[in-house]
Image (spheres, coloured by chain):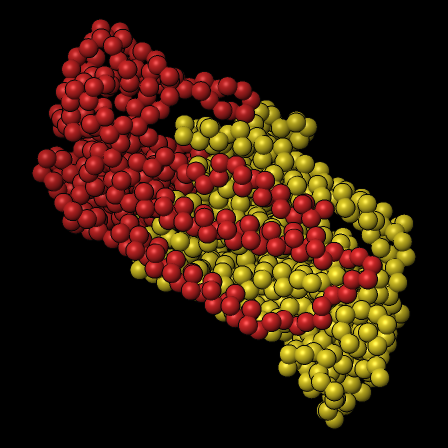
Amino acid sequence: MALGFAPGAAWAALDFGTLAPDLNSAYGGQVDSLYGLLFKLVLLLFIGTQGALALFVLLFRHKKGRAALYSHGHPAAEWIWTLIPVVLLTGLYFQQKKLWDLMRGPAPGAAPLTVQVFAEQFAWHFRYAGPDGVFGTADDFMTVNQMHVRAGENVEIHESAKDVIHSFFIPQARLKQDAVPGMLSSAWFEMDKVACWDLKRQTLVYFTPEELNPKKVALEGFALNAQKKDATGEKSYRYLPFGKASKVDMLYEGKIVRLPPGDADYVQCPVEIACSQLCGIGHYRMIGYLYVDTPETYSRWWKQMVKDKRRDDESKWTGIWDKDYPQFNQP
Amino acid sequence: MTSPNGRGFGTRTIPSSTSRDKEKRLSETTLSPSSQGFFRRFFWPSDHKVVAYQYFVTVALFMALGGFLAMLIRWQLAYPGAPVPLFGALMQNHFFFDGAGRISPQGYLQLTTMHGTIMIFLVMIPLLTGGFGNYLIPLQVGARDMAFPFLNALAYWIYLAGGLVLFASFFLAQGASEAGWTAYAPLSEVSTATPGSGSGQVFWLIGIFLAGFSSSLSGMNFLATIAKMRAPGMTWGRLPMTTWSQLVTAFFQVLATPVLAAAVSLMFMDKVFGTSFFLPTGLHDSDDQLIGGGGGGHPLLWQHLFWFYSHPAVYILVLPAMGIASDLISTFARKPLFGYKAMVAAMTAIMGLGFVVWGHHMFVSGMSPAMATGFAMTTLLIAVPSGVKVFNWLGTLWRANIHLTLPMLYALAFVSMFIVGGLSGIFMAATPVDVYIHDTYYVIAHFHYVVFGGSLFASFGAIHYWFPKMTGRMMNNKLGLAHWAISLLAFNGTFFPMHLLGEGGEMRRLATSTEYQYLQPLQHWNVFITHSAFLLGAAQFIFLINLIYSLQKGEKAPANPWGANGLEWTIPSPAPAHNFEKIPRVYRGPYEYSGPEAAKLGRDWIAQDEEPPR
């Protein structure tokens, strides 16, 4: 019967402690190893306490002739199991504080790329400072639900919200920061791997720009196709050829080249930006897309934006952000 | 003779002249229950036990409602967009359902919001304090009633009014509140932000205010009763742990709940009178129109005020359960509670620290990172007293004589599940890790392990334990065992995999997680969780059947079926209207099992009011 007390123990044997893939080499690995450290500690405590519970119930279960020990406690033991956790948890505090200061302090190294994020029901607006590097000028460009960053570069987001609280969450970057109306929040992250879709195996994979060198990565000419598998709503995804172009832009050996779509091994694809704060009816589909670029694909995109003078939903920026919160544009 | 209590408490065994006076005074207090008519007895009762029954029955109804909402939530998460069997067809275009009997995204948010609100404010807090607190405190301290019977009856009716207001909000044209049980501004305040933030949210605010008001009144009553109504000889060191936990909880109810009252009042003013305590300057609606009201407020102010109450509320939800578990474990281990003083100190430490950890709900809110480090420290440290409690329960079991009765099984399940819930809390105290798991199913798993696996299992234990005292009958053992086993299994099947969802990064409050590509591999867990949840829901019918069956046909209970020491077991079952014929005199602590005094009587227990045997 005592076995009934620890059904959790059976679960612990499962693949427990696996977070979403980590692509943030600036501090993601440290977050994961802190998680791993906590996990080991907690697993030890879990086995120790649940094991003792089950064992004591087995060992000291009533039987004829057994008498309980008449004892009101053991002060020495109690001091020990009070002070050891104090020391342990204080140690943990300093361990986690070091990492917290890194994560939430200023980004180290060279000046990071700053991207402004303005959240509304139910979209993410992004603004880049454009060639002059200053926000609130005519050469800024804006996108909706599409963000690009360069692999290996520190990115600082400056975010606020128009209507309600949203939360900017990139699981693979171990980044989450609320966007609150009326105030500017900032956080930084870095991604070192490019998300690609393996066309042969129809699955998501991650590569560093160097690893991508020998591979042919299509930058256009393919579209994502999602299909519901069953009533549970689970979907399977495929990238399928899209459009009739005989040649498409492709990244190959560190250059952008024109090749037939059929040559592609991979398609560059985004990772999702989730909203993790309840923001209304459309909360469940407030999804943004983050492309991690190589230097080549990033400059291809940047040039396109500048050339097109892309200013999607410009009025959100000029009519609200710049007008009501000019202080948010201060460097 | 050395003190039978051993460790310093309770050396003051001789009643002083003042307590002898008190005893005389208390004995002379007479109330005549027979003169009360039906209405007076059941609608404005002066008997704390009847007030407790009122809470129990009301809580059971709200729990059934809250549980039903949870089943709908689970259906939607496993089979998003599929019509809900039976209920969907019955309630098309009403409540949470669209014309095809499916749960709409708006309906889903109402379900989660109201499930949380009902389970916290209308079920767990009133069950643990209004129900068990009311029933047990006077019995355990040796009093004939609460200090303020009028206030007690009033508190119940205010609670019921609050519950009915919340219930009524389901019938509003735009539905109940859907801004989450945490009601973060501005979503909860701006009626154009989401339909439920219209009148639904106003009803929510009124309901919460009333429920909180009731909780404060109960708390004051409990404090006065425990402080002033203890029987002669019932020193602080001889109080059963259940009563100690109610005392500590009452401090939370009296000190923290007014802050909630202030917060909901401010939000009510924002919504009804156009102030803007929580609305910043430059807030816009979905049509990019500036929202009036002047601005100048701050959304994070709501979060600070809300969590200043609602984190302590988590301890209101678990401390009484800890007290109950301590009583049950010591009784059925037939062994004194290990470290009585440490147990009291731990609860007091939890109360002290409990007031300064609220910021851990706000690590990613935009609050200063420097403040977050302070809250991380206090949050990590609050694990120490919680750990002390677990170790002391284990210490109580060490070299005990364990009788695996039903109440004991529930109490042991409480300890086991509370350990899981406590340990997962450590991940959230570490700020860098919390950033990732904040607002994911990890958090849902964590607090359901504490509140459901912990507090509710302890409550089931308490019901099985004190049922004989309440009704004069025993609960059925076979049915109880089936309920315990299936519930424990299904509970773990429901909530353990939520840790895995959280680790995979699945956010809470998504009407469906299947819009996200990265969450697809986790969807099969959602199906598994839903099936477990249905089993968990079904298992509660076994409990219901047991209650009804045992009430009618249960074996007749003696005064003290468990061989327990507390004062409540010295009076007949069911407890008479005014509890004690004569106010008892207390000679020892409540946990003197298997001691030398008991041995002299040839048993392993000795009631608190038995004269020391020679």
Q: For the point 69% across and 48% down, which residue is it?
A: A2
Q: Where in the figure is residue A116, as x and y percent of width and height?
A: 23, 41
Q: Colour of chain A?
A: red
Q: For the point 76% across and 43% down, which residue is it?
A: B482
Q: Nearer the viewer, residue B124 or A6?
A: A6
Q: Where in the figure is residue B368, as x and y percent of width and height?
A: 31, 57
The furthest residue to the left: A132
Q: Is residue B130 above or below residue B88?
A: below
Q: Nearer the viewer, residue B155 or A4?
A: A4
Q: Where in the figure is residue B27, as x and y percent of width and height?
A: 82, 83
Q: For the point 28% across and 15% down, which residue is it?
A: A265
- Relative side of B115 to B609, left or right: left
Q: Nearer the viewer, residue A305 or A34?
A: A34
Q: For the point 48% across and 31% down, which residue is it?
A: B522
- Is residue B265 in sight in this rendering? no
Residue A152, by quadrant, is top left
Q: Where in the figure is residue B546, as x and y percent of width and height?
A: 81, 46
Residue A270, by quadrant, is top left
Q: Nearer the viewer, residue B186 or A168?
A: A168
Q: How many numbered marks are there?
A: 0
Q: Colour of chain B?
A: yellow
- Relative side of B559 to A287, left or right: right
- Is residue B396 in sight in this rendering? yes
Q: Is residue B588 above or below residue B364?
A: below
